[in-house]
Image (cartoon, grey):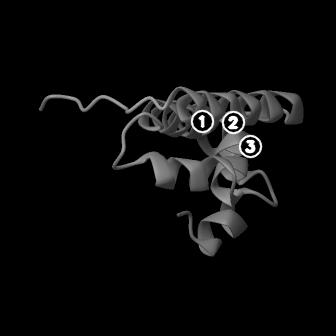
Amino acid sequence: MISNDMKNLFLPKGIFKKRNGTRFALLAEAIILQSIEDLWNKKHSSSCKNFFFGDDFDICAKMAGMNTIEQIRIRSFVTKCLSGLKKRNIIPLRRKA
């Protein structure tokens, strides 16, 4: 979870873009992509659901430079994936270490 201090530092003033936008954007994109991948991992799926339908996704999406339409598309994709997994009763595969 992202702390309130981070929210206050980066979101209201857009400071992250002025400092080094590419690094923050790349990090935010990596977090979003990893969360999508972790939806199929039983250990992480509930925290990923909380991420996508909570404030943390909004923050990462803004840092990544996503507009509102792109955010809606990602959330729709996640919702479809989750409903597809439930309908098909698919058990996510475990990765070998």
Q: Quadrant of the C terminus?
A: top left
Q: Residues within 10 Å of mark 3 (few under 14, many from 20)?
A: some
Q: What is the three-letter code of the residue carrying label 2?
A: Thr
Above or below, 43 against 74 in this view is below
- Where disc 2 sits, the SS reads helix
Above or below, 28 against 59 in this view is above
Position of residue 14 measured from the top left corner of the image (x, y, whole percent): 77, 51
* Residue at position x 22%, y 29% in the image: 95
Q: Which residue is mark 2?
A: 79
Q: Which residue is mark 1?
A: 82
Q: Which residue is mark 3?
A: 62
- Where disc 3 sits, the SS reads helix
How many numbered circles are shown?
3
CB-based contact (under 8 Å), mark 2 and mark 1:
yes
* Residue at position x 33%, y 49% in the image: 43
Q: What is the three-letter code of the residue carrying label 1?
A: Leu
The picture quadrant where one finds residue 94 is: top left
Report the side of 20 relative to 74 (left or right). left
Residue 84 vs residue 53, the one in the foreground: 84
Q: Nearer the viewer, mark 1 or mark 3?
A: 1
* Residue at position x 37%, y 38% in the image: 41
